[in-house]
Amino acid sequence: VMRELAAFADILIGNEEDCQKSLGIGTAAGVEAGRLDVGAYEHLTAQVMTAFPNLERAAITLRESRSADWNGWSAVLRTKSGFFAGPAFEIRSIVDRIGTGDAFAAGLIHGLAAFGADAEALDFAVAAGALKHSIPGDWNLSTEKDILALAKGDRLGRVRR
């Protein structure tokens, strides 16, 4: 069913397992190793775009699981004109992983609508997912201002009033 639906999509957002199990498109990326090769995802997104020519964009989240509460977090985005790798975050003392993919997807959709530039939208989406790791529950309660600050490189964690 997912392959049939994907044929009508403008954008696909998921992880490597979604591509493999839902679309039948695999990658040689070793997710169990704890470190991901962005080049494998460049190839994977190219395969997805080729399989579904209607797509304008394909985004894949990248989670490097070091332990239950320590992960690396990033994402990649392929468009018809290029490939972008988002910023990488080391997230320690994770509060809740549930909802991080949804926060990323919402961040990407918002970023594309608000900023227009693919790379900027990807940075915003990765930051939204990173911040969600610090919030219990399924909802990302971060503000656009907080996400933008992180996306633009503010990783100090200082309190802002």
Image (cartoon, rainbow, N blue to C red):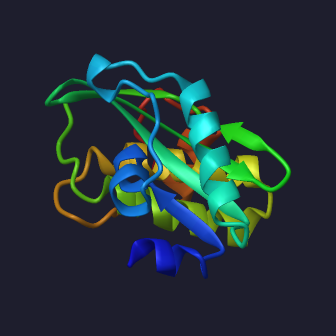
Farthest residue toward the left?
68
Q: Does the rendering let one see residue 86?
A: no
The residue shown at (51%, 28%) is 88
133 up-or-down from 4: above or below: above
84 up-or-down from 139: above or below: above
The residue shown at (44%, 23%) is 36
Determine whether, in the image, residue 92 is placed left or right of residue 110. Answer: left
Q: x, y (%) of residue 128?
A: 46, 52
Q: Does the rendering let one see residue 156?
A: yes
Determine whether, in the image, residue 15 is placed left or right of residue 47. Answer: left
Q: How many marks?
A: 0
* Quarter that holds the N terminus: bottom left
Tell which of 125 and 56 is nearer to you. 56
Q: x, y (%) of residue 98?
A: 21, 55
Tell which of 138 and 53 is nearer to you. 53
The residue shown at (41%, 49%) is 15
The residue shown at (47%, 50%) is 25
Q: x, y (%) of residue 81?
A: 85, 51
Determine whether, in the image, residue 82 is placed left or right of residue 3. Answer: right
Tell which of 161 and 86 is nearer to you. 86
Q: Quadrant of residue 154?
A: top right
Q: x, y (%) of residue 157?
A: 41, 32
